Amino acid sequence: MVQGMLARSYMIRESPFGQTKASEGPWLEMEVFPRRDIGVGGIFALCAEIYFDQISLQSTLAKQVRKTVSPVPVAVMLQSKFSPDSLPVLNGKVFLVTGGNTGIGLSTVAGLASRGATVYMGARDESKARAAIQEIVKEHPNANIHIFRMDLTSLDNVVEAAREFFRRETRLHGLVNNAGIMGVPFSMTNDGYVIQFQTNYLSHWLLTYHLLPLMIATASSAEPGAVRIVNVTSDGHALFVPRKGIDFDDISLESSSSMTRYGQSKLANILHVKALHKKYGPEREDKGGPEIWVAAVHPGHIYTNLSKQATATAPATVLHTVAPIMRFVGVLHDRSKGALSSLFAIASPDFNRSDSGAYVVPYAKIGIPSDLARDDLLIEKLWSWSFEELKKKGKLDRLEPPNSVSIEG
């Protein structure tokens, strides 16, 4: 399956063929993913369909942007003037990228390190992280990258990782919550959560919670915009999401499809960003204090392991065959393109104060997420649920980082 999908704010209806199709209108008409898994034949058909849609969409998009009542957002592949080479010199700045040893995360680490930043590469497997760093150093010999071992399937490990970060650093300028899984078979972690939801969202919420005091302390002695948080999400937050958005009555969604569970976790990533923006961004209620700028990033159709790991949607042999084909025909793009929006949001001077809280789409463009992703009640409800859930499990005890501040629910 692909990470990301060409879609806009379409009014949708069920077609006789079981696919969701944009209704007639003066805007654009195209097939989009149904809210369920597709078969092997559908994957191949989708490859061709997206490929030709990209060609026609790029020439007509500028004149045909419309917004309808649908909850499905815009995320169309367009060229951007942004380049990692346009990033400022980042000497003296410290960044942490989860899932930094592979795919989009690896390119994000490389982009930051190439500009002089100190970068911590979050990874479960130290040997793979070591090999990834060697790959970067071949191109950037002066790269200052450190392995940062963490396992997002364990809440205890996440807390210990935050504690270890405080031992090693007294500042943190950028946190990229990048690690994620997609379309994997249903399974529960030892903490009692479905693995996609914990890996993609809940563990990142916990990591961010514990690192926030350090980031606020860093921001207090830096210029506005020097400290930022990026959550990597997907337009799957709208295409596969449960009807309720976040199903608090059945957070595991065991009877739903793997992609529905994925969609819920990706919506949660955006809601997390919206809550952080309200509490710690430029528009927060207690004006005048240090600012943390935040963004949710949809990276686009990128050729990564996510394209081949969705074994709950198709056999592994099929995914390993189809993904390279999709890359060859231009449906899936190189991981370096997937990192563009993350690099833009985490370190570019072109990401402005007014952009904090935004949904960034391919590539390095400010987009509009779904209606659910902008629902104030849902934003607050998920924050409260996450806080209370992790508090009950005893994971929110303050770690006392340097110059700590109080973070409340």
Image (tube, rainbow, N blue to C red):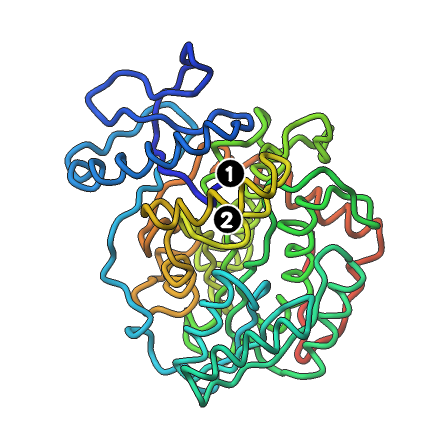
Q: Amino acid at mark 1?
A: His
Q: Amino acid at mark 2?
A: Thr
Residue 265 shows in the view: no
Q: Residue at x 40, y 39 (%)?
A: 5
Is 213 on the left or on the right of 47, as rendered? right
Is 332 on the left or on the right of 37, as rendered? left
- In the foreground, 77 or 225: 77
Is 106 on the left or on the right of 337, as rendered? right
* View extreme (bottom): residue: 142
State if disc 1 and disc 2 touch (CB < 8 Å): yes
- Up/down of 332 relative to 122, above or below: above
- Up/down of 308 relative to 228, above or below: above
- In the foreground, 381 or 340: 340
- Up/down of 73 relative to 339, above or below: above
Q: Give the numbered dot on residue 233.
A: 2
Helix, strand, or loop for circle 2?
loop
Q: Residue at x 72, y 49 (%)?
A: 387
In percent of width and height, residue 215 lies at 57, 71
In percent of width and height, residue 369 lies at 42, 40
- In the foreground, 295 or 252: 252
Helix, strand, or loop for circle 1?
helix
Picture quadrant where residue 178 is located: bottom right
In percent of width and height, residue 328 lies at 35, 50
Label 2 packing within 10 angstroms: few (<14), some (14-19), many (20+)? many
Picture quadrant where residue 187 is located: top right
Q: Which residue is mark 1?
A: 237
